[in-house]
Image: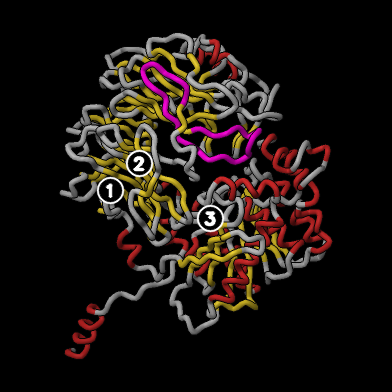
Amino acid sequence: MRTLTALLLIATALPAQKLPITHEDVWLMKRAGPPAVSPDGKWAVTAVTEPSYDAAKSASDLWIAPLDGSHPPRRLTNTLAPESGAVFSPDSRQLAFATKREGDDVTQIYVLPLDGGEAMRVTNLSTGASDPQWRPDGKAILFESRVYPGAGNDADNRKIAAERKARKYNLRVFDSFPIRYWDHWLDDLRPHVFVQDLEEGAPARDLLAGTRLGAQPGFEGEFGDSGSSLGARWSPDGNSIVFTATTDLNRSVAAPAPTELYRIPSAGGEPAALTAGPESYSHPVFRPDGKALYATRERSEAVALYSLDRLVKITWPQPGPPQLLTGDWDRSVDSIAFTPDSRTIYVTAEDQGHDRVFQLPADGGAVRPAFSMTEGSYSGLVIPAKAAAPVMVALWQSMVHPADVVQVDAASGANRFLTEFNKDRIAQIDWQPPREFWFTSKAGKRIQSLLVLPPAFDASRKYPLLVFPHGGPHNMIKDTFFLRWNYHLLTSPGYVLLMTNYTGSTGYGEEFAVAIHKDILRGPAAEIEQAADEAVRAFPFIDGARQAAAGASYGGYLMNWFEGNSKRFKCLVSHAGLSDNTSFWGATDDSYFWETRNGGPVWEQKGAWREQSPSAYAANFATPMLVTQGEQDFRVPLNQGLEMYKLLQRRGVPSRLVVFPEENHWVMKGEDARQHMREVLDWLARYL
């Protein structure tokens, strides 16, 4: 008995053995969203998803944490439906957000008092409500809702919806382009800005109803991955509202659809344009002192298919022409935050494998790093305007740490974690931060790659190499925790993962990103192969005789190119990859971008239309390939995966097709995602 007791004591004293990451580890990590911070600098709120493989058991609620670290974060809501767009009232005592609660047919705006009590619904629109923003005096909230054309009020919207529901037929009719977006068909609803006074019984007012701007056939908000938004914001005095919109969406089949900034009186009236010209302006935000409006600006796609998001300043309340502040800075502005004295701007930007924090004078001047950093990435930067002392809050993550809310020391860059939602699970995983290396390509470009090592890594062993280029192509492999194609999960069978930021990647300057449009596949593919050669040369633990490659979206496009243009790999995995440039153009949800990038109208077949189309090289297909595809993907439609698989079968190449009927461009359902990774890892194991 004494011997058994001693063994148990020894076992409990030993550190727990770390284990390779599993899909369950990846999928079940809690997912924190960008923080909302109270104006007084005392509280941070974040939306936290607690996922489950059973969607009915997943939860998403708001959590609140004190910025002084006096106690751990606590759950603020506990409901079935998620909350989105949380924002503090000007007095820091209430929180507004959008959600769908019991009795709601659609999402509405709720207000939750932070000193106790239940959330109160403040909107009741048949078309729903999203993106709440408090008026500076705290007595009204503006929000967005998508309404039917010609509807002057909610009664009109209800009538139109009832008439359409009563129709005995079902069809979609279009008179212009676009008709689909990512994973859904578009309709004729358009975004409008509403103001809801917080007096009991006050109706919501549609500010764009009856305006000439809102009636234009090409009127729409700015499109992002999750849909379109007007991004409306109050002016500092609450007398007007600024938003982003285009009037040219109906002409986007053959020309760019730039977005401009508009100003509308909060009492109603015709919106007035604050910007004009071919450039696109978006993401308006006011300086704390109310003397300037800031936004990001992109060059027209007619000039450059990729452009940096550059920061502009517009004087306020008498708007002048936009003043370009970051014209000489070769990086793209993401989140923007101001010091309470309005003298300094902090921004986040992609930069060589990280999202870093930079700073510049609010009236213009040199941009410089706010502090040095060697790991991880920041996003959702916030600085409360009324805090007793300057406070910087952000979301921080790395490849070995899912996103958490942190308070950042602006001088040293040190993080103090306000949340640690996955601390215990993180500690149990055998993983390492990525290694990075640079090389000079044969074309003379400096190229960065990140290397991820397998669990139980032993430098004296030899490991197969798995090449995984990012999608986009205007994207960047960086030190972040990736859910869908988790980097460490890909290494878990005992592979070294190589990820190269080839020409076209963001975070290395505009010229580097734009250069891909002159050489869509051939050049980037060559750089990726050269990076693999360099990795094999530089790292003796890589077995150069066993190489495979996998990719999704543009990465899948590269896999299809490698199929006909490289004999390097033992096998390939292509998810949502283009197989034929011409048939892709006919089925995808966009037009002008692809037409311009490939070298002219599709019927002319100049430039890359044929010369850099993977299907043109089908005679060379020989490498075993797994093809996976979401049936609801309208960006890279199902026909592309079917065409690639058919060519492989016709050529007699070992191949496997996996189609997910309920998935889109991304495999997002838990069980589908788990099976997708099983298919990928099983295919790699078969050949490596």
Residues 476 and 307: in front is: 307
Mark 1 vs mark 3: which is more N-terminal?
1
Magenta segment boundaries in residue numbering:
297-322
Residue at 81% from the left image edge and 64% from the top image edge? 620
Are the residues at dot 3 and dot 2 in contact (C-beta closer than 8 Å)? Answer: no
Secondary structure at badge 3 equals: helix
Q: Which mark is residue 673?
A: 3
- Residue 311: in magenta span: yes
- Name the residue nearer the viewer: 266 or 490: 266
> Residue 530 at what x, y percent from top left?
64, 67
Task: Return the residue at label 1.
Answer: 410
Q: Of helix, strand and loop, which one carries label 2?
A: strand
Residue 266 falls within the magenta-colored stretch: no
Q: For numbered disc 1, what is the local secondary structure?
A: loop
Which quadrant is home to the C terminus?
bottom right
| Residue 127 visible in the shown view | no
Q: Quadrant of residue 241?
A: top left
Q: Residue at x 69, y 34 (%)?
A: 592
The front one of 221 and 520 is 520
Is 82 positioned to the left or the right of 642 in the image? left
- Which SS type dominates the magenta stretch? loop
Give 1 or 529, whichever is nearer the viewer. 529
Residue 302 at x, y percent in the picture: 66, 33
Mark 2 — residue?
Answer: 346
Which mark is first along the chain, 2 or 3?
A: 2
